[in-house]
Each structure stands twice: as structure tokens, then as C-alpha cells.
Amino acid sequence: MQHTLQAFKPLLSKPANIAIIIHRNPDGDAIGSGLALQAFLEKTGHKADLISPNEIPNYLKWLPSTDRITIFEEQVAEAQKILKKADIIFTLDFNDLSRLGGAFTDFLKQIVKQKIMVMIDHHLEPSDYAHFQFSNSNKSSTSEMVYDFIVDMGFKDLIDKNMATDLYTGIMTDTGSFKFPNTTPHTMCVAADLMSRGINHNQIQIKIYDSFSLDKLHLLGEALNKLVFLPQFKTAYIALSKADLRKYNYQKGDTEGFVNYGLALEDANFAALFLENDDEGVRISFRSKGNVPANEFAKKYFNGGGHKNAAGGRTKKSLAEAVALFLEKLPEFKSKLIQANV
Ligand SMILES: [Mn+2]
């Protein structure tokens, strides 16, 4: 396994067939970094296709060229053809092939040995499937890493307004608009450079955060009413059932950001959002302040993981059982939960 750009560079010295893959339920960072990398590779003479396991959420469809993304679950034959033909496969914003989900994971595992795999990712504990692993959990986002990748390759001038919009969106969403602890001086320098390329940063903010449907706002109201605070554990949680979601005509992405409201409580150091989902059981998002390891909790009890302050998990249990397990396990983390050292 190689970790240096120097070792990787020669692979892009002649035109290659390249596939770029992002994780299931893609977010702003996955889609933004994917689109920007695709544009960069095309500008440098390669054939590059971007594949997402499932659909692009509505709040991100306005990003330039999302209509060119191949959706594995809807275009299986086309996606498999692209992957079979690819010499090089980039995987962006995830650390394990299981994050593709089901049939996509199985298919990729069959061909992974025949391909040159390149990981660019900022999650902890990367799996070792990649020949070239660019993994750095100190980075705010994969979009920041793709920016660095393009710059380090010597092509900073190729970053145009559309690519800057993609990368800025990824960085902005993964840092919660530059407020999460993963925001570094370098993150701000990258954002500043992207801004200088003519993007409309205020419009990006409005399109992502001030474009709620009335149903989504009403669902948020329901979620906030259901918020439970446990002062003894400095923990807040929200559980939304299938019926709750149906009542407000839930669309994918509608609960994006809801988990952060739990952390908005002055005394909360840990927040969870439980979502009952038809095909996937219960999905849980975790957020934390300071030193509270949200990823440890997600990994230990909910088959998940992520970053220290932002993690996710899932379970096949019922919603009530998932919440019960959460409540049962909080005492084990009590000392960490009440001393976040923010
Ligand atoms: Mn990310």
C-alpha cells in the first residue's frame, strides 16, 4: 500500500479509464468531492465516471452536473459496465466497502483485486482494500482533501467556478458552515481560495440550509417536540417513527441536520437522532461536543462509526428497542458524557 502522491502521480501521466465511487446515502461532501474530482480528471484528459450507490438527495441536486451521476441501484448494468472497464477506481468519503451497501459491496469485492484502488477519505480506521490510501482523519472533509490532491498534482489553476462550488459545498456541509472542531486554519485558506474563484457562497448556503419545504419544517417541529433531555447524562435524543415521517411526506434528506438541535441545548454534550426506515431498520445519527467520542459509542453498540464529534450507526431492532439499548448503554459512558472539556 502506498500513501504518497509521488508514487501515484505516474498513473495519471497517460489517459486512463477512471471510475469514482461515493458512499450510500451521499451527503454534500461525497457528492461535492466526487463531482470536482470527475471534472479535474476530465480536464486532464481522462475518462471519468461518477457512481453513487443510491439517489442524490433533493437538497443537493442543484449542484452542477449531478444529472451525469450513475446511480448503481437504478442503473445496475450501466454501473457494472463502467466499473468493469475502469483501470483505476477512486473511492471517496468512506473507509470500508460495506458503506456502499448490499449488491454494490458484493460486486466491488469481486473486482477489487483486478483494479487500481485509490482511497481519498477523512474517516478513522480505513480498511486496507486500496493500493493508494490517502486517509487523514484530521481533515475537515474529503472535499478539502480533493482540493489538496489537485493542488499537489500541480493543477491548482484548473479549479474553475463549478469545481469550486462543488468543493466549497462539501467543506461547508461537513464543517456545519465552518463551526465544527474539524475546521482548521487550512480549511479556511482552502475556502478562501475557492471563494476567490467566483462562487456565490451565500447562494450555496441558502440552497442547502434555507430551502426547506413546509413539510420538512413541520417535521422539524414534531422532532423538537419529541426531543428528550437526560440531564444526568448531558444527553439529548429524538426518535422519529415511520408514522411520524409519513405524516409529513418524508423525502430523503428531510431530517438532515435535525440531530444538531439536540446539541444546541446548553447542557447537552451528546445528541442522537433515531430514524425508523422501511428497508434499513433504524438509522441513528450521533453528535457530540468536545471530547465525547460519538464514534466509539456508535461503533460499540450500533454497528457504526465515524468521527469523534459526528458519527452514525444502524440496527435491525425496532425503534423502541433501539432507544432502549441506547438508554441502557449511556451509563457506561457517563464519565465521558459529563466531562466533554469543551
Ligand atoms: Mn465527509
Image: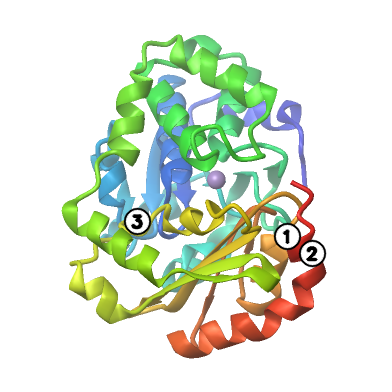
Lateral position of residue 241 relative to residue 109, left or right: left
Q: Answer whether residue 142 is visible to the viewer in this image.
A: yes
Contact check, label 1 and label 2, Cβ < 8 Å: yes
As measured in the structure, the alpha-carbon distance from the residue carrying label 3 to the one carrying label 2 is: 44 Å
Q: Earlier in the sequence, mark 1 or mark 3?
A: 3
As measured in the structure, the alpha-carbon distance from the residue carrying label 1 to the one carrying label 3 is: 37 Å
Q: Residues within 10 Å of mark 2 (few under 14, many from 20)?
A: some
Q: Residues within 10 Å of mark 1 (few under 14, many from 20)?
A: many
Q: Would you name the residue on which mark 2 appears?
A: 336
**At x 44% / y 55%, what residue is drawn?**
84
Q: Would you name the residue on which mark 1 appears?
A: 293
Residue 278 figure quarter? bottom left
Q: Answer whether residue 13 is visible to the viewer in this image.
A: no
195 and 49: which one is in front? Answer: 195
Q: Would you name the residue on which mark 3 appears?
A: 79
Residue 197 figure quarter? top left
